[in-house]
Image (cartoon, grey):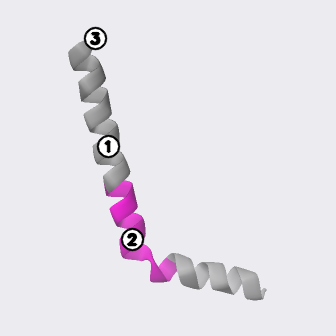
Amino acid sequence: GHFRSWMLEAWTGCGHKRILATSATTIFWNVSSTRTRFFA
């Protein structure tokens, strides 16, 4: 119970970080895909 509540608190508390990480991953994926397509 305590661990789960701590996880939930960390998850909701770091919402903006989660969004930032998702954006960074998406951008990186798009850049690497474009680079691969360009050199292919």
User: What residue sits right under mark 2 in the picture?
Assistant: 17
Q: Say which label, 3 or 1, has the lower sequence index.
A: 1
Residue type at mark 3 is Ala
Residue type at mark 2 is Lys
Numbered disc 3: secondary structure? loop
| Residue drawn at (74%, 82%) of the image | 3
- Alpha carbons under labels 2 and 3: distance apart: 34 Å
Q: Which mark is residue 40?
A: 3
Residue type at mark 1 is Phe
User: What residue sits right under mark 1 in the picture?
Assistant: 28
Q: Say which label, 2 or 1, has the lower sequence index.
A: 2
SS majority, magenta? helix
Region rendered in magenta: 12-23
Q: Quadrant of the N terminus?
A: bottom right
Q: Is residue 36 above or below residue 13?
A: above
| Residue drawn at (31%, 28%) of the image | 33
Q: Quadrant of the C terminus?
A: top left
Quarter where residue 38 is shown:
top left
32 vs 18, left or right, is left
| Label 1: how many Cα within 10 Å (few below 14, some 14–19, many 20+) | few
| Residue drawn at (24%, 15%) of the image | 39
25 vs 7, left or right, is left
Q: Is residue 34 above or below residue 3?
A: above
| Label 2: how many Cα within 10 Å (few below 14, some 14–19, many 20+) | few
